[in-house]
Image: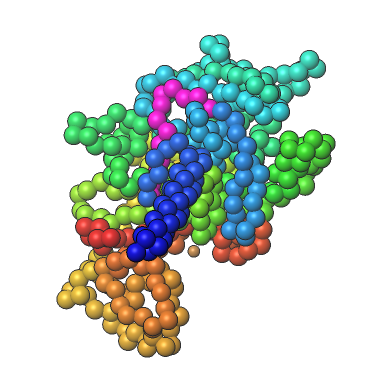
Amino acid sequence: MRTISSKRILWGMILMLLLLTLLSVVMLSGSQRAAAQTPTGEGIVCTNGPNFTLNTQTGYIGTPDDNVVYMWGYSAGAGGFQHPSPVLCVNEGETVTIILHNDLPEDVSIIFPGQDDVLADGAPAQPQVDGLGNLTSLTNVAPANGGSVTYSFVANHPGSFIYQSGTRPDKQVRMGLFGALIVRPPVGLNGETYANNRLDSQFNPDTEFLVLLSEIDPYLNQAVERTVLYGQPYNFNMTNYHPRYWLINGRGFPDSFAPNGASWLPTQPYGALARIQPHIEGQPKSLTRYLSVGTVDLPMHPHSKSALIIGRDGRAYEGPNGEDLSFESFSIPMGPGQSWDGLFSWSDPDSYEDLDEYRVTVDIPSPVDVGFGPLYSGSPYLGQQGTFPVDFTTMNQCGEYYVISHVHALHKITSWGAPMTGPITFLRIDPPGGCPQ
Ligand SMILES: [Cu+2]
């Protein structure tokens, strides 16, 4: 009897040790997560202002071809490196203050395109020149190796903006010193949310999405990495700049549609999956804020539905007397540095979810003659799931639809030659009332 009980105690101790080890691993990976924000499934993750402290950070991101790329970024407060830099959200009329602290070995700065009267350390922000009169920065800098600068401005224009480095932007923006800035107009009397100051810019705040497009030439990043980490001379010739990666919210497909804060993408916290339900007549639509820091035009193409373009570059699309100039577009042809605000929805005119109302009129081939996509439900009807061959596993949860959305410059939906990766994501349409899971 004594031997058995001591064996039990021994096994109990081993089990306890295993549990403790597991727990510490889980806690460690939690504390190593870079983003300070609370991870949620989909949609924009705001770092709320109006006062921010941004610190330069360095780190690595993963790409769909199993490469890792050295990057720079701004991180909020005590947050570790993240890419892209945080989505800064402020309210119209607020005085926004951003303390930039720079630990990189060269001067950096931030410019705020679309904002008026930006101050640096309390005086109007100014382009910087060296002793010979050569431009060295588009604005006041936080000096290398520990310097700081404080920018401030009144957020007078509601809309979607980019903030990015104004110092050697050809190198520093490409290295990751950029992010999105959202200025929110006042909410309505009943809590209605708007994209800008027009009443027809109302959107459903539960379905607000970000599409931030960027690009990477890994040879530039490698040259910077060798200089910063190994003290080698910087030898990248910018005339040879040639992007090999294009990203959406800092990720390439299929990472792009993983949730916000996915544990396996510890430095890339922002997902790009848009998730909605069929639109109910009279209810506000969904909003996507499209932004590009690429060097050439990047036309984003959300399949199956157009977007109503209601804003550009942080301004409502309207005439001098407030005329509505919004327009429907099947492609969002973003130029470098532009922002486009688009309202969209998906509705179900054929009652796809209603089997009595609507029947697919073609014969669906036998499963043995069909190749299934891993997101297919097995049924053409919204909210229905069909049967699959026994060896097939689907990721579909409740008969939801997935509609692709991608950069339509098709040679850019790649990761250094790995096809059908890069800036691609999905619109996920759940059945009315949502997915029970
Ligand atoms: Cu397409």
Q: Can residue 216 be seen in this view?
A: yes
Residue 288 percent across, percent down from the top left: 40, 46
Residue 109: in magenta span:
no
Residue drawn at x 38%, y 83% is 389
Residue at the image position 36 percent from the left and 80 percent from the top? 388
Q: Which of 295 and 210 is in front in this view?
A: 210
Q: Give the range drawn in magenta.
A: 42-54
Q: Which of 110 and 351 is in front in this view?
A: 110
**In the drawing, does residue 11 fall left or right of residue 124?**
left
The picture quadrant where one finds residue 157 is: top left
Q: Where is residue 120 in the image (x, y as percent from the top left)?
A: 56, 16
Vertical side of 335 occupied by 104: above or below: above
Q: Which residue is drawn at 31% across and 37% down?
A: 194
Magenta segment includes 50: yes
210 and 435: which is toward the camera: 435
Q: Is residue 322 visible?
A: no
Q: Residue 213, percent across and down?
A: 54, 47
